[in-house]
Image (cartoon, rainbow, N blue to C red):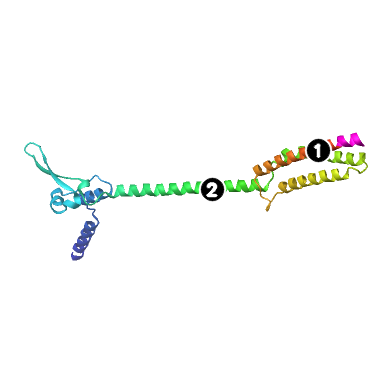
């Protein structure tokens, strides 16, 4: 009999211990502090004992025989605030930081890509082929003209031929130096193009002088 009573006592105590108790006042408190709305209970308790904390204030409410003062809670009058807005603000701040970091990363990537492109541009001559045929044609004309002058004059025009050949060799050496590619010979293609245009003008002048010399050889020899 005693054993049965003990079992019932223990069983009932266990059942009591496992029973969930819903505390609406506590729920209002943590909900106000977490997400809102701003509300506490019991209202008069918070008005008299936690007015600064809760932001409690009184107001008159007409309700027939039940008219009287009521308590309501204003968050802006409280010396504490809802946690959620602060969390949202922190999240927005974090998002803004991440956005700035991403923007900086994109800028660095663009600068890196641009530098890689420039490095490739400096290491490879992409414009020489546009001038190569003109250079080849003019060199052929210069060589044939100077050879004709030496043959026609039987070597008597050697000084003039040597001088024009020297000037032509300097232009060709400059072209070859500009056309060098790879590490140690970095030069932007825009600069190469400017140089080739200038060398082309100089070579055209040599061609013109050789043609004049050929005319002299034909006339005097």
The residue singled out by tag 1 in the image is 209
Estimate the x, y position of residue 3 in percent, counting from the top left.
21, 65
Which of the pair 83/107 is nearer the observer?
107
Q: State which quarter of the image contains the N terminus.
A: bottom left
Task: Compute the Cα span from label 1 to label 2.
Answer: 53 Å
Estimate the x, y position of residue 77 in percent, counting from the top left.
20, 47
Quadrant position of residue 127: top right
Q: Residue at x 26, y 49 (%)?
A: 82
Magenta residue check for 215: yes
Quadrant position of residue 134: top right
Q: Residue at x 22, y 62 (%)?
A: 10
Res 191 label: none
Judged left or right of residue 107, residue 141 is: right
| Callout count | 2
Q: Tag 2 or tag 1, which sits nearer the N-term?
A: 2
Estimate the x, y position of residue 166 in percent, counting from the top left.
81, 46
Estimate the x, y position of residue 41 in percent, counting from the top left.
17, 49
The reply to whether residue 39 is visible in this rendering is no
Q: State which quarter of the image contains the C terminus.
A: top right
How many neighbours does mark 2 have within 10 angstroms: few (below 14), some (14-19), or many (20 or more)? few
Magenta span main SS: helix
- Which marked residue is nearer to the observer: mark 1 or mark 2? 1
Q: Residue furthest bottom?
A: 2
Marks 1 and 2 in Cβ contact (< 8 Å): no
Q: Residue at x 19, y 61 (%)?
A: 9
Q: Residue furthest left?
A: 65
In the rendered structure, which segment of residues is drawn in magenta? 214-221
| Dot 1: element | helix
């Amino acid at each position: 009999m005693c054993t049965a009573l003990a079992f019932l006592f223990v069983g009932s105590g266990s059942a009591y211990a496992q029973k969930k108790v819903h505390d609406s006042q506590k729920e209002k408190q943590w909900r106000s502090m977490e997400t809102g709305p701003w509300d506490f209970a019991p209202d008069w308790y918070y008005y008299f004992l936690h007015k600064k904390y809760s932001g409690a204030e009184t107001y008159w409410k007409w309700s027939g025989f039940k008219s009287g003062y009521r308590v309501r809670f204003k968050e802006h009058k409280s010396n504490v605030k809802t946690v959620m807005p602060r969390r949202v603000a922190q999240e927005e701040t974090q998002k803004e930081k991440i956005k700035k970091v991403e923007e900086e990363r994109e800028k660095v990537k663009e600068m890196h890509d641009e530098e890689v492109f420039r490095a490739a541009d400096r290491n490879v001559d992409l414009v020489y082929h546009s001038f190569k045929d003109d250079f080849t044609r003019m060199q052929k004309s210069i060589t044939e003209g100077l050879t004709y002058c030496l043959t026609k004059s039987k070597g008597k025009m050697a000084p003039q031929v040597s001088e024009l050949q020297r000037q032509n060799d300097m232009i060709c050496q400059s072209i070859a130096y500009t056309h060098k590619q790879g590490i140690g010979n970095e030069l932007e293609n825009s600069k190469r193009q400017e140089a080739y245009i200038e060398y082309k003008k100089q070579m055209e002048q040599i061609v013109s002088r050789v043609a004049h010399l050929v005319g002299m050889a034909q006339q005097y020899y």
